[in-house]
């Protein structure tokens, strides 16, 4: 059954690395919508140390995570095994968006084997709670492959498309500031 861990040890690292996807949950401080996003591309998530993780945030449908992190920093990341070994792992803590034009991003990017097109930030999380659960009711699924659609779209996107993506990401769906208008994110990597 459920167990809490004091750190992300080698066993938890192996479980995280074995998962083909993860889920990110954030919420604004007052009212608004809870954001729960599935994330793919298993090479976009890394464990930096026993209490710090990061993932590459790619341009996509919105910037709720960035907006909520700017608002209050709260974030939970969930890994869920769909194989015969049932397990759910939640990493809860405080996160921040690290811009691609920062020195911190330059240090973080060395932990990723590859960078996908359209990287708008690295989300870095200082993990304060690490807990698992059984996942006994989660169905079995077999992974066919990673879906290449986002990479293909962002590879073909021209500068004008990125300008539209940045404009769409200025605010969350609830109107919270996301990508700062005074300091817009640089063109995606």
Image (spheres, rainbow, N blue to C red):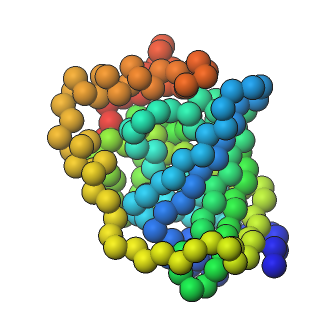
Location of residue 84 in the rendering, given as x and y in whole percent from the top left corner: 57, 86
Q: Nearer the viewer, residue 149 or 142?
A: 142
Residue 11 visible at all: yes
Location of residue 167 in the rendering, given as x and y in whole percent from the top left corner: 39, 20
Q: In the figure, is residue 44 to the left or right of 133? A: left
Q: Nearer the viewer, residue 10 or 75?
A: 75
Q: Nearer the viewer, residue 130 or 86?
A: 86
Question: Considering the image in quadrants, where does the C terminus appear?
Answer: top left
Seen at 59% across and 50% down, the residue is: 24
Q: In the figure, is residue 12 to the left or right of 43? A: right
Seen at 51% across and 53% down, the residue is: 38
Quarter where residue 112 is shown:
bottom left
Q: In the figure, is residue 157 to the left or right of 126? A: left
Q: How many marks?
A: 0
Above or below: residue 3 compared with residue 67: below
Location of residue 101 in the rendering, given as x and y in whole percent from the top left corner: 41, 34
Above or below: residue 173 compared with residue 47: above
Above or below: residue 135 compared with residue 78: below
Seen at 74% across and 71% down, the residue is: 132
Location of residue 1 in the rendering, given as x and y in whole percent from the top left corner: 81, 79
Residue 112 visible at all: no
Quarter where residue 41 is shown:
bottom left
Seen at 39% across and 39% down, the residue is: 60
The single residue placed furthest to the bottom in the displayed view is 84
Quarter where residue 148 is shown:
bottom left
Above or below: residue 92 compared with residue 30: below
């Amino acid at each position: 059954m459920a167990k809490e861990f004091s750190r992300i040890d080698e066993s938890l690292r192996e479980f995280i690395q074995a998962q083909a996807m993860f889920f990110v949950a954030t919420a604004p401080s007052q009212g608004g919508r809870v954001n729960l996003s599935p994330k793919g591309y298993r090479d976009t998530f890394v464990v930096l140390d026993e209490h710090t993780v990061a993932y590459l945030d790619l341009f996509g449908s919105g910037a709720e995570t960035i907006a909520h992190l700017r608002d209050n920093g709260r974030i939970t990341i969930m890994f869920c095994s769909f194989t015969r070994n049932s397990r759910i792992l939640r990493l809860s803590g405080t996160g921040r968006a690290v811009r691609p034009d920062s020195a911190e991003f330059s240090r973080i990017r060395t932990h990723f084997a590859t960078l996908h097109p359209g990287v708008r930030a690295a989300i870095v999380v200082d993990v304060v709670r690490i807990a698992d659960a059984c996942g006994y009711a989660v169905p079995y699924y077999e992974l066919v492959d990673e879906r290449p659609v986002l990479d293909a779209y962002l590879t073909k996107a021209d500068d004008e498309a990125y300008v539209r993506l940045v404009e769409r990401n200025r605010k969350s769906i609830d109107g919270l500031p996301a990508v700062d208008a005074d300091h817009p994110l640089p063109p995606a990597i």
